[in-house]
Each structure stands twice: as C-alpha cells, then as structure tokens.
Image (cartoon, rainbow, N blue to C red):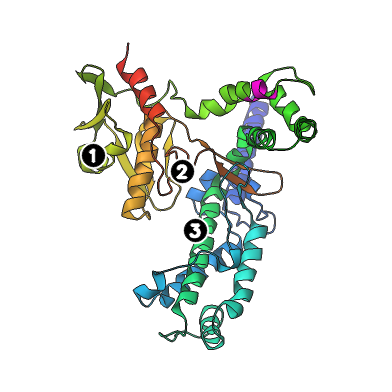
Amino acid sequence: MKVIDIWGIKLIKNLSIVYFLFIFLISCNKPLGTQRKISPLGLNELQCINGRVKIDPILIKIQQLFEKSEALIISSTFTQNVENDFKDLLVFNKTPLRPQTLSIKKFKKLYQYIKDELHNELEPEDAVNVYAFLFGKRTTIETSFNDPRKVSRFLYALSKLNQVAERFKSKSCNLLQLKSQKSNDVRDYFIVKDIWESSEQEIVKRKKIRPRLEKLCQTIGKKCDFNSDIKEILNDYKRAKVGLLYEVKKWGFKNIGCSEIREREYQLKIPTQKKHLEEFKKIAHFWENKRLKLSFYPHPRGLRIVNQPYGPSFVKHSDFSTINLDKRLDPLGRQKVLAHELGHVFGFEDCYVEFYNDDKEIIYYEIDESNLMCSVDYGSRVKESYIKNLITKYCLP
C-alpha cells in the first residue's frame, strides 16, 4: 500500500509538470491578438529581438509613404534651396523649455495633416499627380513639376516625419525602462531659471515658480519657502542633479592607458580590435586638444564596433568594449555617432533627457545642443571640461 501511494504521488507530480509545460508552450506560441493591446507598455526588448512587437499601423503607413516618395526625387534641383517651413508642419524642438514630444496620437495627426495639406502646398496639376501616386493606386509619376521647390518642401517634411517615426519605433522596444527614467526630468530647473531671469517684478516671478521651486528643494533635500534665495537653490540643484550629466563616472572601459608625452601633455592609449582601427582613428579629433591626444592600437580584446540592423546606437554598461552602431547611418552621421558613443566608453553619460510619461508620450530634450554628449547635430562638439575630466581620470595619480 505504501509503494502504491508513493507511485501515485509521483504520477500526479509528473502529470502536473507535463500540464504546466503544455500551458506554457501554448502561451508562448499564442499570437499577439486581442489580448495584447498596441499600448507600448506591453512591449519589451526580448519581443523586439524576436520580432513579436505589434507596431501601430500609422507608423507602417508613414514608412511606406516615405519609401514611395523617394521616387519623386528626380534631380538635384529637389534638394536645393529647401525651405524648412512647410507651414510649420513638423516642428520637433529639443530644448528643455520646448521638448520633442512623440506619440501615436501625434503621428496620426501629422500623417493626416500632411495628406490634407498636399493639395494646398503644390500646384493643382502637380498635387493631383502626386496625391494619386502616394495615396492612390497609381504606380507611376510624372517627372516634371511646375514648382520643384514646393515638392522639395513636401519631401523634406515627410523625411522628418519618417525620421521621428523610426525613432519612436526603435524606442517602443524599451518603453518600460524609459518610463522609469522620468526621474531624470530636470525641466523644472530650466523653467524656474528662465522665469527668474525674466524682466518681470520679483513678487510675480516668485508666485509663478513657487510650486516648481518646492519640487527642486525636495529633490535636493533642501528646506525652502517663499522668501528663499532662488539663485542659491538653482546653483545647488545644478550641482546635485544637472551637473551629474557632465561628469565622468568611475565606470567605463578600464583598459585605457595614459602616458605623458610632454610636460602637461598626455596621450590616451586605447586598445582596439584591428579591423576597427582606421574607423576609430578618423574620429579621434573629436576628443583631442592641445593637452590630450588619442592613440588607438591593435588588441584582440580591444574596442569593437557591432553594426545593428536598426537604431538607436548604444553602449551597454555591462560591456564598455563594444559600440553598437545603427548601420543605416550615412558616413558623416556615423562618425558623429561613433564619437558620441566613444564618450560612453570613457565613462560619460548622455546629457539629454528622454522618458515615457503617463500620457503615452516619449519626451526628449537636450541640455546643451552644442555638446556632443547631448546632441549629434551639426556643430556639436566635445567640451573642454570633458577632456579635462579624461586627463584627471586616466592620466593623473
């Protein structure tokens, strides 16, 4: 009887395991249908890798529209003298006071707007032809336009829309992490600073900034009231919160060496896999000045570049020897992004802020658009303070 009881218990246990495995396999292979909403909060990085992310149809429409519009670029005339105003169709600011805001709701609105405004932007005859080609069943398009500049403006606006839609799609794989980054939002600091530096009366300014000022004080653990020293609070907050974005961290690629080539002049020695040496040498100048030079030398376990099929480019905290680059970047853009990612290898953080809010929007803004670690736009560069920090970290005892 005891043997039978033991056998029965084992049988029940084994059947339970088989049942739960069966249920698990069914749930894994179940298609993403009505139970999974398009809401990005249901997505994660693993699903993106496996291609199981359900992309909102409007993002696919924008991509298809852009790809089809490339047939309109029939000569260099189209890309000359492009006016970037197209009735302010796509104004994506990137400053703390006017951040870039991306959402499915906004994409739907912009797509419809660009569709409606096409007739108003182009000459009547051109508009009919282009509209039928882009939104209808027409498969060919006339190669001459009454006013090519207007077509150029349309293409420029559409390319910007596609660019930010691509960014939103790539970020949709990681929105849970982006939501956790809301704590990095420092817009209150810039709003308070902007109001305080205005020409309004002091009593009016204090009333305007009071609720935001209280948030700043709570963040830095400082007691403040209506009569507090505003400049002191702003300076304390900048050092405690904003300033952290510019400091080199203790973490970073540890195998970087340094030698003093002349008095108070140094050279960073950076191990690099042989096949990537030339590409790194081309971007060394971004991080050099009179006091610091960069030397990349071959090493089997040195820095390497991994081309990713889609963006964004990144460096993992768990692997500072690998720079992952979006392979779709043009040559000049690739150099700028590689130089930016090299900053992460050194131990610097991004000095832009990006997070996902409760209104299902991705908020993005740059603290300093002239700073390469904040922005890779034209004209951005490495600040002298960064190079000074590199010398302090890697070269000085």
Q: Amino acid at mark 1?
A: Lys
Residue positioned 43% across, 72% down in the render: 70
Percent of width and height locating residue 280: 26, 40
What's the distance in space between the residues labelled 1 and 2, CA to CA?
A: 21 Å
Tell me where residue 305 appears, x and y as whole percent.
31, 42
- The amino acid pointed to by label 3 is Gln
The label nearer to you, 3 versus 2, is 2
Q: Which residues are magenta?
A: 230-234
Work out whether mark 1 precedes mark 2 in sequence or the reverse, and give the earlier one. 1
Quadrant, the C terminus = top left
Check disc 1 and report its element: helix, strand or loop.
helix
Tell me the amino acid under the disc marked 2: Ser
365 or 305: nearer the viewer: 365
Relative to 334, say whether 86 is above or below. below
Residue 6 picture quarter: top right
| Residue designated by label 1 | 281
Q: Which mark is residue 311?
A: none
Q: Quadrant of residue 388?
A: top left
